[in-house]
Amino acid sequence: MKMSGNELESTDRSAHRTIERVARESYGRLVAYLSAHTRDVGSAEDALSDALVKALTAWPRDGVPENPEAWLMTTARHSIIDHVRHQQVAEASEPTLALLREDSKEPNMTLRTEFPDERLKLLFVCAHPAIDPAMHTPLMLQTVLGLDAVRIAHAFLISPTTMGQRLVRAKTKIRDGGIRFEIPQERELPERLDAVLEAIYAAFGIGWDDMAGVDQRGRDLAEEAIWLARVLLLLMPQEAEVHGLLALMLHCEARRPARRDPDGRYVPLSEQDPKRWSKPLIEEAEQHLAEASNRGRAGRFQLEAAIQSVHAERARSGGIQWNAIMMFYEQLIRISPTLGTRTGYAAAVAEAKGAEAGLAALAGIDMEAVSAYQPYWAVRAHLFQRLGKTSEAAAAFDRAIGLTEDSAVRQFLLQRRG
Amino acid sequence: MQFALLIYESPEAFAARNADEKDPYLGAWRAYYKALVEANVYVGGNPLQPPETGTTVRLKDGKRRVQDGPFADAKEQLGGFTILELPSLDAALEWAARCPAASIGAVEVRPVSPEYLCRVTGVNQLG
């Protein structure tokens, strides 16, 4: 059958769309499956890139295969095997030989429509204690979601070359360092899962709940972080903290449209118009929070999500239950006494019991630790201002302004200082 | 280690230097300076007069060549520099991102080279 030019073009476009969609949805699944055998994430990624390039020529020409994912898988696998055959077989590493053996056992890979989802193992490998914690998130974004080093570098404020080198180094460590692709044992699971959750949250960015806004660098990756959390939830639907993390991020995401006024000015949480919050996202967040509490194991992310849930309640009640927020922060400090938690607690105390009590709570924080921590100075400035202590307030505002990266937040603080 | 933050500014930013006390760019710079000093990372630095006040000298075939202004025909010009004492490039980039010029111009981060300084001066300042 001959196709007209238009038909050809539309096949072409639809093939390209399919490639994009498969790449987006299956990238992590394919990398995880390929590297679970070889432990070589780097070559799995290279092989998959080769396969995607081949798909760009083959699919528009021959039509999109019935099972595009299996096609990519087979092609990528052959690319790994070819690569090994070109080298001296004697030099080939044991894991790669294992893959070769496995391949000869399953000659009909193309006919297989299903292969096991190894992404959970890959997530645990990325957040393995032997890997530099600063690289956990970049590794996940690259290996599970297929983000390129340049985009990751922007979000983490590192030069693209350096980020590329760090990613390569981390992958070499995974390959040569004996890090196993496996789900951690029961007894070490909570700690290992925490590292995975932390890494996903780091991609989301911090400080949405803060009155003056913090480092919002992670904002570019917020959607990717939610995607990662959804993948994790799919793989571990029983874990309360996974629901908690997703609830927390959805609550914060729901407020995105309200964080800037129509002129682009920064609007702090307490002054946001709840009508501009996304109702479906809040509802979904609440469902996950309820799901988490049904499992009866409290945790850091559930508590943080609970705090956001109290804020979200303002859409219905018009007020904020500061006592509830204070109580959640007290529990949170017991589990995770970070600077952010302690600053958030002081801000809640100030709302519940008055500015002086809030300042007393702030006074318990080590001054050395906050010298470059913007939210501390923003809260302090706000509380001194409420007490009418103008010069103390101005000094704290200056510190907060000097530590602010986001220019809209900087303008907001400059105006507040007066 | 010491890092130089090279501040590149637009003509508008240079012009804003004559604005009144309420100017937000000035306010942001004052706050930034205070934060650097209080965090104990500030070593030194200076703003520079606008690019048109510059004069460039070079010797070609033994002859003096003098030219008004800097050569670069870029939209943003060097407007000053700050030297910071910090443990790593990552920390320097954090501070560069907070610099008021980063939102409207550009901030280049360069490590200071104590090794070369030592070769030039003959004094080992690394201790």
Image (spheres, coloured by chain):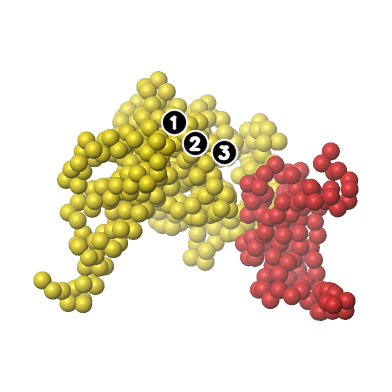
Chain colours: A yellow, B red
Q: Which mark is in front, 3 or 2?
A: 2
Kindly indicate the quadrant of the structure image that contains residue B48: bottom right
Q: Residues within 10 Å of mark 3 (few under 14, many from 20)?
A: some
Q: Residue furthest left?
A: A1
Relative to B3, is A114 above or below? Answer: above
Image position of A30 (left or right of B14): left
- Residue on which disc 1 sits: A179
In the foreground, B78 or A44? A44
> Can the viewer see residue A124 in this picture?
yes
Q: Are marks 3 and 2 in contact (CB under 8 Å)?
A: no
Location of residue A276 in the rendering, given as x and y in whole percent from the top left corner: 41, 57
Instruction: Decide: is A314 above or below A358.
Output: below
Q: Secondary structure at mark 1?
A: loop
Residue at the image position 52 percent from the left and 41 percent from the top: A169
Amino acid type of disc 3? Gly
Q: Is residue A320 visible?
A: no
The quarter of the displayed image where residue A333 is located: top right
Q: Earlier in the sequence, mark 1 or mark 2?
A: 2
Nearer-the-camera pick, B110 or A336: B110
Which numbered disc covers residue B93? none
Asked if disc 1 and disc 2 are in contact, CB closer than 8 Å, the reply is yes
Residue beneath the point at 34% across and 35% down = A97
Find out whether the residues at labels 3 and 1 contact each other: C-beta distance under 8 Å: no
Q: Chain of mark 3?
A: A
Is residue B5 rendered to the left or right of residue A237? right
Q: What is the chain identity of the residue bearing mark 2?
A: A
Towards the viewer: A131 or A407: A131
User: On the image, numbered disc 3 is attached to which residue?
Assistant: A340
Where is residue B80 shown, x and y percent of the image?
A: 76, 63
Quadrant containing the C terminus of chain A is bottom right
Foreground disc of the pair 3, 1: 1
Dot label at residue A173: 2
